[in-house]
Image: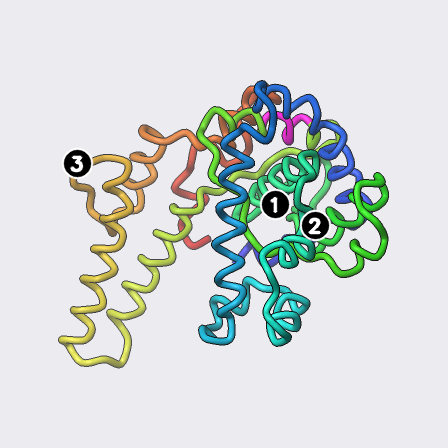
């Protein structure tokens, strides 16, 4: 798969991008929360999220699934094996630190930045390589920058860890955040090679469908699995248009998404760069056999 060739963005440039993001926080905070950060839905939803993860953290040993373990750092799992922490003690160890408005928004912005390259990639003109933000690397740099910018002490920075996703943001708030982030990426010479995550997933499901057809299974098992895949694809397509579309017809699906969906990434990119990113509108040739 072509994404396997993408390279992790270097530490130095990642740090520069995140430093610019850190410095842009006050301006964005005024736009997103004119009545004050503590009164904003962002802060309140972030606290609700932290409280939910705190309870999950306390019961991590009761749910030894791979899914939960993968979402936790080694530090998180080591601490969970010791005596139970109070909510305040848990917050003390997690980034962003409790009561630090600047770092809360910095964390949200950094999380969105990482999300930009979950399925897409950054590139520079006249360079062959494509890049992505490494989540673990970014989380470490976030905490390091908090220390370098005198927001936290060295001892705290050495033990802190991230343990929860950012809060939900509505479309306009996401747009403001993305415009800021793309402005920073443009400053550093980067452009976006955009890939639609659900379209990639649909292609994977279609590949599974045909693999099952020629697989070593009995007829009933084959039929059951293939019908489930078609149902899964149709369920995705229903979110874009209630009109029936053949779930195995990739060309029709690509046309549908071009008619019905403009990703917030694409819209914000257009406002900053005054052109669509590479990969939009979607092309059938890009997704066939990706």
Task: Answer left or right for 265 relative to 225.
Answer: right
Task: Answer left or right for 90 relative to 240.
Answer: right
Q: Looking at the picture, how far across and down is residue 211, in whole percent?
A: 31, 68
Total marks shown come to 3
- Write down the quadrant of residue 254 in the picture: top left
> Which residue is denoted by mark 2 in the rendering?
138
Proximity of marks 2 and 1: CB atoms separated by less than 8 Å: yes
Give residue 207's mark. none
Measured Cα–Cα span from mark 2 to mark 1: 8 Å
Give residue 114's mark. 1
Residue located 63% across and 58% down the image: 90
Q: Residues within 10 Å of mark 1 (few under 14, many from 20)?
A: some
> Magenta stretch mostly in which secondary structure?
helix
Residue located 80% across and 39% down the image: 16
Proximity of marks 2 and 3: CB atoms separated by less than 8 Å: no
Task: Answer left or right for 93 relative to 56.
Answer: right
Q: Nearer the viewer, residue 179 or 259?
A: 179
> Which residue is denoted by mark 3 in the rendering?
243
Q: Is residue 53 above or below residue 30?
A: below
- Write down the quadrant of residue 101 in the picture: top right
Residue numbers of the magenta segment: 179-183
Q: Looking at the picture, how far across and down is residue 13, in whole percent?
A: 79, 42
Outermost left residue: 220
Q: Nearer the viewer, mark 2 or mark 3?
A: 2
Proximity of marks 1 and 3: CB atoms separated by less than 8 Å: no
Helix, strand or loop status at disc 2 = helix
Q: Is residue 258 above or below residue 55?
A: above
Q: Looking at the picture, how far across and down is residue 40, in whole percent?
A: 53, 29
Q: Nearer the viewer, residue 99 or 53?
A: 99
């Amino acid at each position: 798969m072509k994404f396997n060739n993408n390279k992790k963005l270097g530490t130095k440039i990642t740090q520069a991008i995140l430093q610019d993001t850190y410095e842009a926080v006050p301006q964005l905070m005024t736009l997103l929360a004119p009545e004050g950060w503590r009164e904003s839905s962002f802060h309140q939803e972030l606290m609700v999220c932290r409280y939910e993860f705190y309870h999950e953290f306390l019961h991590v040993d009761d749910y030894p699934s791979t899914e939960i373990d993968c979402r936790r750092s080694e530090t998180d799992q080591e601490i969970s094996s010791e005596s139970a922490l109070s909510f305040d003690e848990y917050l003390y160890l997690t980034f962003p630190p409790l009561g630090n408005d600047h770092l809360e928004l910095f964390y949200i912005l950094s999380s969105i930045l990482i999300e930009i390259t979950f399925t897409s990639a950054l590139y520079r003109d006249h360079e062959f390589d494509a890049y992505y933000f490494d989540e673990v690397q970014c989380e470490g740099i976030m905490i390091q920058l908090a220390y370098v910018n005198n927001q936290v002490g060295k001892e705290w920075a050495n033990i802190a860890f991230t343990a929860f996703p950012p809060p939900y943001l509505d479309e306009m708030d996401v747009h403001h955040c993305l415009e800021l982030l793309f402005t920073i990426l443009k400053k550093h010479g980067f452009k976006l090679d955009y890939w639609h995550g659900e379209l990639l997933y649909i292609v994977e499901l279609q590949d599974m469908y045909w693999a099952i057809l020629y697989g070593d299974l009995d007829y009933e098992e084959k039929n059951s699995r293939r019908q489930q895949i078609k149902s899964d694809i149709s369920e995705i397509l229903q979110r874009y248009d209630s009109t029936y579309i053949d779930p195995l017809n990739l060309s029709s699906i690509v046309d549908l998404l071009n008619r019905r969906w403009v990703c917030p990434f694409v819209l914000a990119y257009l406002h900053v760069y005054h052109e669509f990113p590479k990969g939009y509108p979607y092309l059938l040739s890009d997704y066939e056999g990706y």
